[in-house]
Each structure stands twice: as structure tokens, then as C-alpha cells.
Image (cartoon, coloured by chain):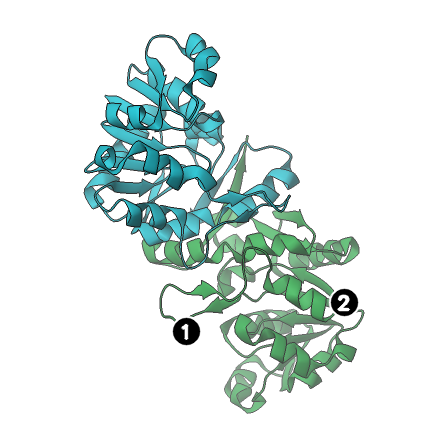
Chain colours: A green, B cyan
């Protein structure tokens, strides 16, 4: 499948390398694709790099793995036409480090980045997921407690969420996925970031995840 | 020990009944203590009810179990003099239902209720905890997975946090408690509420908790 990943940071590279290793046709999109040359040399022929517009045009499914503060600009560069009708996996968080540590969220509480994206691109099928854990765990949940921890889904399109759930299982081995509801529930997962950042400090590692324990 | 609990809702009653059953001397504080008559009859002589000021004056340790939107007013009625030097367990959340469901937080992101309380009462030893789960689990964590899930602590006073950690174990059986850091980390636990509310909807029960899974 043709997968377009917007972003050139650790999250985009980690997802891109994993999906390329599974035989998917991956294109990373960046404002400056040239800086991905070293990464492309490592990953080999299954991955390419291009502009945001090229990556989105290439894609059957688009993954937004940009830094949250730049997501709307990157999606604008990708172009509404190349997002229309496609599943758009939004895994970004609106973390704002401009006031130093700890970061705040640039949008929170009564809105979320996921909702902003869905409103800006109503013809895209936005599914918010994977934004609650570190990149290496996104693509390999079984390295932690055999996968016994949770991932969350938010989105307005039930069929898109079912498809994403299936992909997350096939691609990465995710088995425990909770559908929180429509895209407004992205507020909940994005607002996990403040405790996530503090837990990383308290535990001394980003390699942890939330498990929802029920009776 | 003399324990003053500010509040007359489910959380205050649940904590009060449990602490009274352990032989502590409990006084619930309310704007309208008369409405606690039925509850007092159930719990028996170990518990009393009074004004916010009476409960705080009675207390060696004060527990803020009011609704978050009313916490600062209740604490003002309790009086700074009766909070000074005492451990103040803040278990409230600033949930605002004025716009319907889902609730938003009246303070979030760059501040928190825990911080507001510590700033308003600098001589109180504020420890934020227990605000991330339903009342029945606060006082009996072992009913869920034998207690294999987490509680969080936030506060500026290390000695107060150590004392609270010990009490939470003695009173309720809490064993897995993560110290997130100073009182600003209360932003993280209060901002768990939006996903908590949605998880309650998705799971169909408030009887769940977060476990932090590490490698």
C-alpha cells in the first residue's frame, strides 16, 4: 500500500522504517526532504522522500507525524485535494515548548489538534491514535509486558477506525485498542501528554505506556 | 487521628466512612451540615459533621473532597489559620459541567487547582492525590486486579508526600504510588480527567484505573 508520512523527525522515521520493512511503499514528506538522505540510505528502496504535497499525493493513507505546532501548515502544504476521502492518521501532539519545560499544549480542554484537523479537512477521514506513547513502542508494543497495555482511537468515521484498528494489529502487533468515540475524544488523549512528560521524568525513561485496568 | 474532610458528596462520604471504620476521628465539613444527618446515622459515632471551619479546626490533616469549582470558596470558609502547617490532601478536580457533557476543566494546561490552592495557602502542605479514580477504588484499590494499578502524588513538601504515601498504604492498602514531583505536576493528573470521563463512557463503568506499564 502507498503510505505518505508527513514529518521528518523520530516518529516519522520510526514509522517509515517499520512500514518499509513490511513491504509498504512509503514516502516521507518534509519541507526539506534533502535532510532525509542519510535515513533513506539506511532504509533502502522501499522508502522515498518528497515534499508534503508529493507524499500526500503518493498516499492511499496519510500519517500526520509532524510536530503538532506545525501540523496545520504541513497539511495545508499537502493540499486538501490529496487528503480528500483518505484515512488521515493523526499521531501529533500540540506540545508548545516556547515557555520551556514543562511544555504546555497550544490547544486543549475545549478543542484539540485532532478536531482542528478534521474541521480544516472535512473530507479527510481523521483517526487520532498512537499519540500517547514513544515512537519505538508505537511500532513494537510487545517489547513492553508482551503488549499488555493500551492504545486509543478517536474519530468520527467508524469504518475508518475499524480499518485503522486492523492495520495497527497487522503492522505493529497492537491488540489492546480502546475506541473512545468521536474526534472530540482526542482532547483526552492529547491531554495525557502533561502527565506523560512528568512520568518520563519520574521513571527516567520514555519506554512506558498506560494500561487501563478493569475489574 | 483527627481528620477533617471538606465536602459532603460521594467522595467525602466514602472517605469519611472508611476512615471512621478504621477508628479515626472524622469530621465532614459542609456549607449545610444538616444534610449529612442520614449519613451520620449510618456511619455511627466515629464521624461528625460541621461547618467547613469546624471541620478544619478539628483536623490534624485536612482532605479537600469538595467539587473543584467550589474548592477555593470552601477553603476560604475553612480559614487559613486552620490550614497552616497541616497536610492538605487535595483530591478535587476542577470539572466544569456548565456547558454540558463532556465537562471541561476550569483551570488547566498552564495552571491547576492544586497549584491555586497551594498559592492561596502557602503555609498549608498541599499534596494532590487520589483525584484520578472513582471513590470506591480510592479506599479499596485491591478490588481491582489485586491493587496492581497506580496512584500519583504531586506536592512541594517531600516530607508531607512521604507521610501521605504511608497513610494511603495504612488506610486503604495502596502499594503502587508514583511521585510525579512538585505541585505543578498536578496539571498532569487533573488533565487525566478528560480521558477518564470518555473511558467511563467507552467501558460502561467508573471502576477502572490507570496502570503505568514499564519494561
Residue B107 against residue A72 in the figure, above or below: above
Crowding near the residue tagged with mark 1, few <14, some 14–19, many ≥20 C-alpha atoms within 10 Å: few
Report which residue position mark 2 lands on. Answer: A122
Residue displayed at 64% across by 34% down: B204
Dots 1 and 2: beta carbons under 8 Å? no
Secondary structure category for the residue under label 2: loop
Q: Which mark is residue A41?
A: none
Residue A102, image x, y percentages: 37, 63
Which chain does the residue under circle 2 lie in?
A
- Give a yes or no on whether discs 1 and 2 share a subunit: yes
Residue B65 against residue B197 in the figure, above or below: above
Image quarter for residue A156? bottom right
Residue A3 against residue B65 in the figure, above or below: below
Which chain does the residue under circle 1 lie in?
A
Inter-mark Cα distance, 1 to 2: 30 Å
Residue A185, image x, y percentages: 63, 52
Q: Nearer the N terminus, badge 1 or badge 2?
A: 1
Amino acid at each position: 500500500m502507498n503510505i505518505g508520512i508527513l514529518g521528518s523527525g523520530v516518529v516519522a522515521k520510526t514509522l517509515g522504517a517499520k512500514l518499509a520493512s513490511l513491504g509498504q511503499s512509503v514516502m516521507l514528506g518534509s519541507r526539506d526532504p534533502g535532510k532525509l538522505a542519510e535515513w533513506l540510505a539506511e532504509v533502502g528502496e522501499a522508502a522515498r522522500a518528497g515534499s508534503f504535497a508529493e507524499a500526500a499525493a503518493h498516499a492511499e493513507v496519510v500519517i500526520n507525524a509532524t510536530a503538532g505546532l506545525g501540523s496545520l501548515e504541513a497539511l495545508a502544504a499537502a493540499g486538501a485535494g490529496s487528503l480528500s476521502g483518505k484515512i488521515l492518521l493523526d499521531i501529533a501532539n500540540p506540545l508548545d515548548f516556547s515557555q520551556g519545560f514543562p511544555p504546555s499544549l497550544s490547544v486543549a480542554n475545549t478543542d484539540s489538534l485532532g478536531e482542528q484537523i478534521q474541521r480544516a479537512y472535512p473530507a479527510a477521514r481523521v483517526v487520532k491514535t498512537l499519540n500517547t506513547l514513544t515512537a519505538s513502542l508505537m511500532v513494537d508494543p510487545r517489547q513492553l509486558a508482551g503488549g499488555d497495555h493500551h492504545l486509543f482511537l478517536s474519530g468520527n468515521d467508524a469504518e475508518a477506525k475499524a480499518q485503522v484498528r486492523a492495520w495497527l494489529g497487522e503492522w505493529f502487533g497492537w491488540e489492546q485498542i480502546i475506541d473512545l468515540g468521536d474526534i472530540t475524544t482526542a482532547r483526552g488523549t492529547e491531554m495525557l501528554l502533561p502527565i506523560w512528560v512528568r512520568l518520563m521524568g519520574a521513571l527516567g525513561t520514555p519506554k512506558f505506556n498506560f494500561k487501563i485496568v478493569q475489574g
